[in-house]
Image: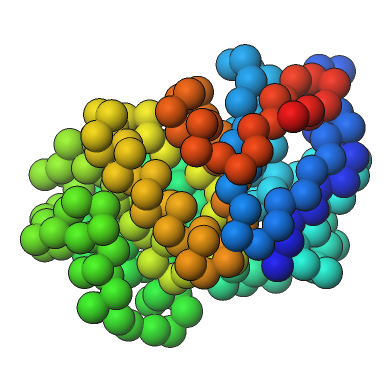
Amino acid sequence: MKLRVEDLGKHYGESVVFAHVSLVVEPGEFVAIVGESGVGKSTLLNCMAGLDRWDSGRVLHGELDIGELDAEKRALWRRKQVGFVFQAFHVLPHLDVAQNVGLPLMLLGQQDDARVAGMLAAVGLEGLGGRLPEQLSGGQLQRVAIARALVHRPALLLADEPTGNLDPSTAARVMDVLLAQTREHGASLVLVTHSDAAAARADRVLHLNASGIRE
């Protein structure tokens, strides 16, 4: 399913975050969004996920208008269709690594230990499934968050600085995993990044500013 953002605008009071943002991301396509700090890249990503509300325009996934869904239906759509890599990880401290990664499957009423183990191996965390988050480094926590976002094979992948805490070698490996998910399963990948190396691997790079978005 393609993602369509149509003339999207967001403001806080009199302060405009962005306006007139339109873009289309096809299934299997990787789009990177870049721009100066504070232009609303993370906010735009949150709008695409239905986590933030917007003030004008529409966000559609396939034929589904996300803005018309109530909170419960938006949450159900995210659970089934969206994988989100947050900048702040949002790893649950009381669950071990394997449980954190398997959480999206559990919420869908599924259990697939082999798939969880495979995702951990793909991001370089093989054998660490039994550890608690407090026993991991920041870079390892970032990879847990990425594995969790991918494990249920979502149709829409949204990633906020997914390689920001990683050394170049590990960052390249993580990008390989994100791209594999995008190409093999026909997901749409939107990645916000300051990394030239990550952006260079995108099919398209879009620059966001307060007045819109451009290639």
Point 72% across, 25% down: residue = 208
Identify the image quadrant of residue 141: top left
In this rendering, is residue 123 above or below 205? below
State left or right for residue 108 relative to residue 63: left
Q: Percent x, y for residue 85?
A: 46, 47
Residue under the image location 48 percent in, 23 percent down = 196
Q: Is residue 196 left or right of residue 7?
A: left
Quadrant location, the N terminus: bottom right
Image x and y of residue 133, in percent: 20, 48
Of 182 and 134, the residue lying toward us:
182
Q: Which quadrant holds residue 162?
A: top left
Point 43% across, 28% down: residue: 197
- Please state, as top left, top right, bottom left or bottom right, where the C terminus lies in the image: top right
Q: How is the image coloured?
A: rainbow
Question: Which residue is depicted at the point 32% across and 36% down?
Answer: 171
Pick the residue in front: 15 or 214: 214
Whether residue 39 can be seen here: yes
